[in-house]
Image (spheres, helix red, strand yellow):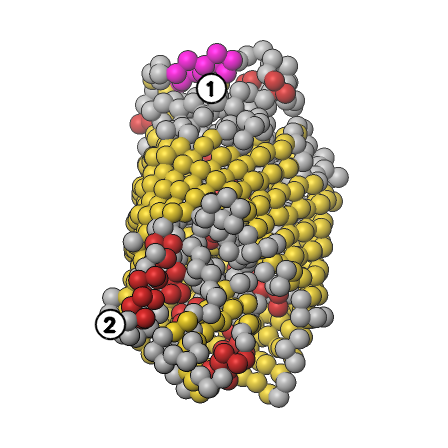
Amino acid sequence: MTAAAGHAGSAQAESWNDRLRAIDRGAQPDWSGWQGATLQIAQAGEAQSFAIDAQPLTAALDAFSDQTGLSFAYTTSQLEGVDSNGVTGTFTPREALSQLLAGTGVTFRFTGAQTVSLTRASPRSGEDDVLELDPITVEGEGGSGGTGYRPPAETNVGIDPFGSSIREIPATVNVIPQQFIEDRAPRRLSELADYLPGVNLRETNGGTGNNGVIIRGFSHGGGNEVSLNGQVQRIFNNQSRGFANIERVEVLKGSAGVEAGVVEPGGVVNLVTKKPQREAALVVSGEVGSDELFGATVDATGPLTQDGTLLYRFIAEGQTRESFRDNFDQDRVLVAPSLQWDYAEGSSALLELEYIFQDQAYDRGIFYLEDAGFDDDFAPIEFSSHEPDDSLKSHSGRASLSVDQRLTEVFSLRGRATYIIEDYLSKGARNPNLNGLYIPGTNRFSGNPIIARSFTKFDGKSEQFLTDAEALAGFETGPLRHDMLIGLEYAYAENENQGQDGQTVWPLNALDPVYGTPPQVIGRAEDGVGRDFDSVRKESYRSLYGQYKLTAWDRFHLLGGLRFDDAEFSSRFTRNVNTDATGPRTKFGDEVVSWRVGAAVDVTEAVTLFGGISNASVPQSGQDRQGGAFEPLESLSYDAGVKVGLFGDRALFTVSVFDITQENLTEPDPDNLPGENFSALIGEVNSRGVELELSGAITDRFDVLAGAAFLDTEITESTSGQKGNRLFGVPEFQASIWGKYDFSDLLTPGLSAALGVVYVGEREGDNDNSFELPAYTRVDAGLFYDWRNVGFSLAVENLFDTTYYVGSQNRPTAVTPGAPINVLAGVSVRF
C-alpha cells in the first residue's frame, strides 16, 4: 500500500468561485460535493440504522447527537426556522449527516473526532436573490485534520459486539487507524508492531512474515490465531498479509477466551477489511522503493444502483521486491472484490472474496554464535543459509458471507460463513541444520563452520471453514440500557502436506558461504533414505457463547461474557511412505469454559475508569507416564486503568496495569529414558506490567501515536532449569512515538511531515536465557504532499541505518535482523 491513498476535495476548490458567480446571476445554489471539498476527517465508522423524522433542524440534530455521540457547534440564530427532511436508512454517521442537512443550506466540517462545526449560507441585507456566505474555510485532505490517528468512535468487532465506544469497553484496546497504515505503508503486520505498547515481533514459519507477534509476553499468530473481521484464522498460513484491503488493526489485550475461543493469553489481533462505500471513488496508486521494490494498487468503490442499496468495492494490488538479505525476494498479488446489499432498513448482506498469490522463500534468518569473530556475536545481517533458487509459492482464496437482519426495534440476527483455502509448494534448502556450529550445550563456536543442508520439497494444502450465528437484543428500562447476545460457532481446519528431504547433502560454509553449487545425491526416498513423509493435522471447534452489557444512566457500563468450547485435534505422521506403515492417528481434545467480567465508569465526560478479569483455556496434547491426558492450559488476566479524552476529545490517552498467569504448562518428563516421550505437568508463567498509549490529535494540525510499556515476565515454575527466567522476545521497557504535522498554514497547502522514534530494550533470545537481543533505537520519517486530487509521499524507515535485531524463534539459530535504511516513494490519484 502506498504511503498516501489519494485525497479528494482540493480538486474542487477552484470551482466554488464559478458557483458563486452563477448564484449572483440568479442560479439556485448547488451545494453538491461541498462535503467532499471540506476537510474529510471523520472516521467512516460502521454503518447503522437511522430513523429521524422531518422536524426542525435543531431537534433533528439533537436526535442525531443522541444516536451517534457527535457534538455540534453552531450559532442558534443561523438555524432558526430551518427544517430538516430527516434521514431514514442504513448509513455511516457522515453519510447520514449529509442526508440530514440536504436542502437546508447548512454545511458541516468536522473539527474533532466527535465534534462538528455547522455553517449556513445567509441572504445579504436588502437583497432577495443574492447569497453571502458566512466565513467558511475550504481545506483539502492533505493534513491529518485532527482525527487522522484518532481511534474510531465505536467498534462492534471483538470484545464488545454492541457497537460501543472504546472508552466504554472494560479492557485495554489498541487501534491502528487507516491513516497511520497509509502513512507507514507496511508490508506486513510486524512492521506496525513497534508502534503498539506491549506488542513485539515474533518471527515464525521460516521468516515468511505470517503476522506473528508477542502480546504482553505471550506469542500469537504463528500462522494462525489472527482474527479477520472478528473470526479467528486457524489454518497454518504461509503468506504475509499486506494492507491494501485492511482498514484498521484492533488489538484486544488480555485473555480473550470469550471473544476468540481457544487462543493464547496476552491478547488478540483483529484485522478489519475495507468495505463498500456509498460515495463513489477510484484511487490508483504506485510505489517504488529500496531493494528494487515496485508496486501498484487500484481501489474502486461506490453504488451499483440508483437507490444506493447495492454497493461494491474492488481492490487489486501487485508488488515485487528484493531484500537486503541474500537469496531472498518476494512477489505478491492481491485481488479483493466485495458486494454489499442493503435489502431492508437495518438489514444487509456482505459478500467478500479474496485471492492472494505469493512467491517468497523460507528465511530462517541469521544466527548468534560466540567466539566466531562476528560483531556482537551475530552473523552479518545479509547472511542466508538458503539458495538463490529457493521458493515457496502459495495461492490462497477466501470467500466470506455475512448477513445482518433486523427483526424489530429490539431484536436482530446476524450470521457469517467463511471458507479459506491455501495451496503451497516449497523447494530448496528449507531446514538447514546449524547445530554443528556449536559446542553441545553452549552457544560457543565448535570450530566446524559447516551447515548441514539437504534439498527439501514440501507440497501442501490448508483449508478452513467457519460459521457462526448470533441473536442480539437491545432495549431500555428507565435509565438502564440492556444489550445481550447469544451465539453458536463451528470451525474446522485441516492442514496436509507431503515432502521429501535427506536424499541429498548440500553443505554450506557459515563463515565463507558460496551459493549456487548443486546438492549431492546420496540415495533415493524409495529405498528408505531420508524422509518421504506425509503429515495431516485436523482441528474442529463447536462453541456456545453469550454476552450481556448493562449501561446505567449513560455512565456505568458493566460487561459479562461466558463461552463453552468443545475442541478436538488429530494428527498423523508417516516418515517414509515407501517403507513405513502409515503412522498412527493421535487424537486429543477437551471441553473448556471461558468467562469475562468487567466494568467501566465515566467519572467525567472525559475520564473513564475501567477494570476487568478474564480467562482463556487451550487444550493440549501429550500424556504422562501413566498414560493420562493433561488439563488444558489455563490463563487468568487482570486488567485495569483509565481512559481519558483529551484536546476536545480529539485524542485518547490510556493507562493500564495488568497481570496474566498461565498454568498447566507441560514439559518433557525429566525421567524419560532414551526413546520415551512422556511429559510432566509442571510449568507456570507470569506477565505483568504497565502500558501507556496516546493516539489522536494534539491540535488541528498535529497527530500523534505514542506508547510505552514496562513489562515483567517470569517463568515461575519449571522442571527444566528455566524457573526465574524471562520469557523470550519481551523487553523490560519499550517506547515509541510517531508525530505528523500539517504545514499547510505555515509553508504550503497540502504539505505535511512525520517523524517517528522507536526504542526497544534488551530481550532474551530464548526461554533458556542463553543469549540476548540488544536494545535498539530506530528513527523513521515521512513527507507528504497533496495537490488537488494527487497525493505524493516519501517514507523512510531506519533513517540513521541502525543495526538491530527485531526477534528470534526462541533459539540462537534463528534470529531476525532489522532492515537497514530503506526508502519508499508513492503517488496516488483520486478520480
Classify residue 303 as left or right of residue 575: left
- Residue occupying the point 59% across, 81% down: 481
**Residue 771 spot, x, y in % from top left:** 66, 28
Secondary-structure class at tag 2: loop
Secondary-structure class at tag 1: loop
Type of the residue with mark 2: Gln
Type of the residue with mark 1: Ala
Q: Is residue 502 visible?
A: no
Q: Residue 452, labelled with which disc? A: 1
User: Which of the two residues, 760 or 28, is positioned nearer the viewer here?
Assistant: 28
The segment highlighted magenta reads 505-515
- Residue occupying the point 49% across, 80% down: 79
User: Which of the two residues, 307 or 332, is positioned nearer the viewer here?
Assistant: 307
**Residue 185 spot, x, y in % from top left:** 45, 43
Q: Main secondary structure of the magenta part?
A: loop
Where the N terminus falls, by quadrant? top left
Residue 284, compared with residue 550, is above or below; it is above
- Residue occupying the point 42% across, 41% down: 793
| Quadrant hosting residue 766 | top right
Of discs 1 and 2, which sits in the foreground? 2
- Dot 1 alpha-carbon crowd within 10 angstroms: few under 14, some 14 to 19, many 20 or more: some
Count of residue discs: 2
User: Which of the two residues, 307 or 433, is positioned nearer the viewer here?
Assistant: 307
- Residue occupying the point 62% across, 71% down: 559
Classify residue 764 as left or right of residue 450: right
Q: Residue 306, labelled with which disc? A: 2
